[in-house]
Image (cartoon, rainbow, N blue to C red):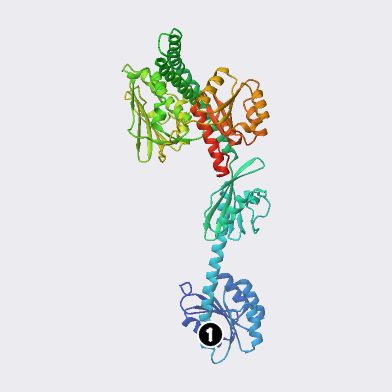
Amino acid sequence: MACTDEQVVMGSELGQAADRALVLEDDPILAELLAGVLVREGFNAVVTGTVAAALAQLEQHEVELVLLDYQLPDGDGATVLEALVRRAPSVPIIVVTGHGDERLAVRMMQLGASDYLVKDADLRSNLRLALTRARSEAVRRRRLERLERQARDDVALRQVLLDALPTAAVLLDRSGMVLAANARADAGRGMRGRRLNDPMELLGAIGEEATVRRRHHEALAGAAVAGVEVVVADRCFDLQWQPVSVGLVLLMARDVTEARHRELQRDELEREIERGQRLEALGTFAGGVAHEFNNLLGTIIGSIDLLRMNQVEVGVVLDPMASAAARARELVRQLLIFARDEHGEREQVDLVQVVEAQLDLVTRLVGGTSALRYERPDHAVPVAVDVAQLTQALMHLVSNARHAMATTERDAEMVVSITSEDGLAVLSVRDNGCGIDELRQHRIFEPFYSTKPPGQGTGLGLAAVDGIVKRHGGVIAVESGLGRGTTVRISLPLAAETAPASTPSMAVRSYRLLLVDDEPVILDAMGELLRASGCRVHLADSPDAAVTLLSEDSSRFDAVITDMNMPGTTGTDFPELVRARWPGLPLVVMSGYLENVDRQRLLSGLVDEILDKPCSARAILRAVDAVLNRRQQASGPQAVQR
């Protein structure tokens, strides 16, 4: 009797660990045979003789395998197979038929069957082999489904992470193909699936800088690259390439416009702090500087009076006068350095010499030598610094220490010391003043924060010092406590020591010089000194007079030495005229004061050397030596001999 709609369960009880197999066979004897093989192979076998019952089983239970008779009472094998594949596309289906037709077998395999068996004497053994293949196929399909689910999950997670980034971002493979893009990057442009050869496309622009494209391709090739900033429509973006995994690169474009604006504002604030502190310190120094100049002028004036009264020999007063004049010149130089508003170029100097050049001003500021002790090493301490800024930092520290000592009843004592250790140059200023408690120490570098009483400080001094030290790659540290005084240490990187330059001798020269200055006393005196050194000198008291001499015959001059600021000119008028009309003529300028920006512009091609006034004949000759030597080396051994 044929199986119809009833279901026959064979094998271990359903619901246990064994897989469920569905047998569609209307012949009860053959159904029992097939089910027996399935049970022996470890399946729970469910037998049904109709398509309707089989589909109901698939609706109600998970089935791992289907054995399908090609001929069934309520449908042919092809129709049933198509229905089963639609209902359970991942379940292996083995077709069993009494017809050994190869064309039928091919058709059934095309419709989705995983195997095809003929009802013959070898059915049992063939079924066992088919079950082995079906199980392997099921394992493969499950693994594939798991990988597909994982891939879908990875894609979804990747998109969530990209969307969470606060920047425009795309994920690229090594060919530059966009695998994923967040909303900020896509912006309706369909980035996904495009090949991104120019990273500027991420910003809706085309890059012109070769650097941007080169770094892009280096990152895709697996190299570690640094970011680059680009400007698009007045907005500043930071492009970054970040390796994610093998063959994948994350390209991000972060809008840093506001951050750059804040940096510019902070830099300007720091400059305002420095300007304010410089003015405050200059006001403090004014009394001491005036006293110092009066002493120097007193020495010079007194020596001149003695000479006029014929009271002493000339040689007796020359040394004091020269010493006073040199000291006055150095004092002016220090004040100009300190008052300079620009950030100058760094130069390698001896920290000991820089500090010692300011000791007189420091002593005046502190209130006398009894209150100041200076400790120095017995060797040079080379550093690469902007001397003007370092001088400002020292003066700020000294001014702060003086204020702190003024609030105590103890005798003031300040120690300025220099040491070198562990590759660092350390400049320390220690005082025995009131000190700073621990709660306020962490705030003393904040702009406008002051530990002084109202009206006695702006709170800008240490903020300015902190900015100067950081710009030089150094660190600043403070040790203090209430009633225990304060020590501030500035640590700067040591520079490699270089051999000291030799001082040129005052040998006789035969240079032919044109000297230009509107001050008759300076012009005549310097002319005589240069002639005494062996030079042939022509004098001009104005740019017009100098142009007249040059127009007559410029070849009779080896160099022009001129003052920068003369009546009727803007400073650079005469040098520009000389360079335009006589481009090969060496030009040395002298000036009482030049901003750094002016000095750099002049030396960029307008003039050959710059001398700070007042300057000596020796300094002028050294400058001419340097210019002519450079030109001779540049033109080779056939240069004109002077």
The residue nearer to you, when weighing 561 against 269, is 561
Residue 135 left/right relative to 366: right
Which residue does the image show at 42% across and 25% down from the upper left? 358
Residue position for label 1: 127
Residue 391 picture quarter: top left
Q: Quadrant of the C terminus?
A: top right
Can residue 142 be seen in this snapshot? yes
The local crowd at label 1, few if under 14, some if 14 to 19, many if 20 or more residues have their Cα within 10 Å, is: many
Number of marks? 1
Residue 56 position, x and y percent, is 59, 73
Q: Nearer the viewer, residue 170 or 401?
A: 401
Say which of 188 and 145 sits in front. Answer: 188
- Residue 492 image-quadrant placement: top left
| Above or below, comparing residue 97 to residue 599 in the picture | below
The one nearer the camera, 512 or 18, is 512
In the rendered image, the vertical position of residue 12 relative to residue 257, given as above or below: below
| View extreme (bottom): residue | 121
Percent x, y for residue 194? 65, 58
Q: Give the x, y percent position of residue 320.
A: 41, 17
Q: Residue at x 55, y 26 (%)?
A: 590
Q: Is residue 10 above or below residue 628?
A: below
Q: Is residue 392 left or right of residue 160?
A: left
Residue name at image x 34 percent, y 30 percent:
376
**Looking at numbered disc 1 in the image, what kind of residue is underneath it?**
Leu
